[in-house]
Image (cartoon, rainbow, N blue to C red):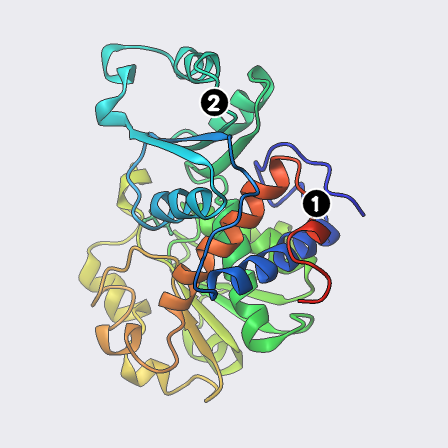
Amino acid sequence: MPWTRKHLITLEELSLAEIDQIHTTATAFKKILRRNVKKVPALRGKTIVNLFLEPSTRTRIAFDMAAKRLSADVISFDAASSSTTKGETLRDTAENIQALNADMIVIRHACAGSPLYLSRILDIPVINAGDGAHEHPSQGLLDTFTMKEHFGDLRGRKVVILGDILFSRVARSNIHALSKMGAAVTLVGPSTLVPHAFTSMGVTVSHDLKSALADAEVVMLLRIQHERQATNPFPSIGEYTSMFGLNKTRASWLNPKAIIMHPGPINRGVEIDADLADGERSVILEQVTNGIAVRMAILYLCSGGQPEHVLPSSE
Ligand code: CP
């Protein structure tokens, strides 16, 4: 099946076959990243603009590296250095980037819907690098890619997502991808951050950490996203950590083969103890590394590349 999408805005809209295509393409790119020369000419002559209007470390650097590994020219700029600080609209900023002959825009924005809005205005591909609490599709794809590397087929696998689900775009993208891939997702956290309404997405909601962890094969921690919260969902960080933080005792409730994930940035000592973040069950840095190959696949496919052309069939 050929890849037909120009934009990547959500995982909600992707089919299972499309998620598989991105993962398969990322696997091929991961092989290329292990070579001495970690670069292919797939996007030579193209210019990709990383428009990050919200802070980022991992996503921005990984998109930057992915574009460079594909031989594209990359221009990265953030809110502080853009004319949005002078009152320019997002539309004007994006139309100017297109007028400067960019071939693709990767956008992160605090407002949900911004990437979709740009995709309807611009002629060039738009990639969502995180929009408010809505979606973070490249993160969901790299998380599920990492899970597949550990478990193979995710059908029936038990994934617990623990923390601030309400304000998490990572949780929403993972829920969409994992549900399509057949995993059983349980959301855990305080009821103010994990309301029952999430069951409409086909997941289980639990406030019983011990029983959820005992069943889990993957536990994904999320930080408290203070920047998106207008009210206090719990009295203090201390109260949150004492009830839902993953510490040594709680990790002992986990299945010995369970892996610990976190999209980052980590707040050590809040949602996860430092020893666990750095421990042998943790695959947090594997997630970060996989983010390059997965984002290479996204940039390549949305630029019109086809999965079967990445590696010669002999490799
Ligand atoms: N996971 C993630 O989006 O991290 P950054 O905010 O550092 O990009």
Mark sitting on residue 102: 2
Q: Position of residue 291 (x, y in %)?
A: 45, 55
Q: Residues within 10 Å of mark 2 (few under 14, many from 20)?
A: many
Q: Who's the residue at 56% across and 45% down the image?
A: 298
Q: Is residue 79 above or below residue 207?
A: above
Q: Mark 1 belongs to which amino acid?
A: Gln
Which image quarter is the C terminus in? bottom right
Element under label 2? Answer: loop
Residue in the picture at 69% in, 65% down: 182
The outermost residue toward the right is 1
Q: Amino acid at mark 2?
A: Ala
Q: Is residue 271 visible?
A: yes
Whether residue 214 is situated above or below residue 72 in the rendered picture: below
Q: CA distance from mark 2 to mark 1?
A: 21 Å
Residue identified by numbered label 1: 306
Residue at 46% across, 13% down: 95
Q: Residue 224's x, y, as percent?
A: 30, 53
The quarter of the picture where residue 131 lies is top left
Q: Position of residue 232 (x, y in %)?
A: 26, 45
Sequence-earlier tag: 2 or 1: 2
Q: Is residue 143 left or right of residue 155?
A: left
Q: Is residue 203 above or below residue 230?
A: below
In depth, the one of 15 and 63 nearer the eye is 63
What residue is rendered at 34% in x and 81% in y? 250
Res 203 → quadrant: bottom right
In the image, taking residue 83 as reference, residue 196 lies left or right, namely right
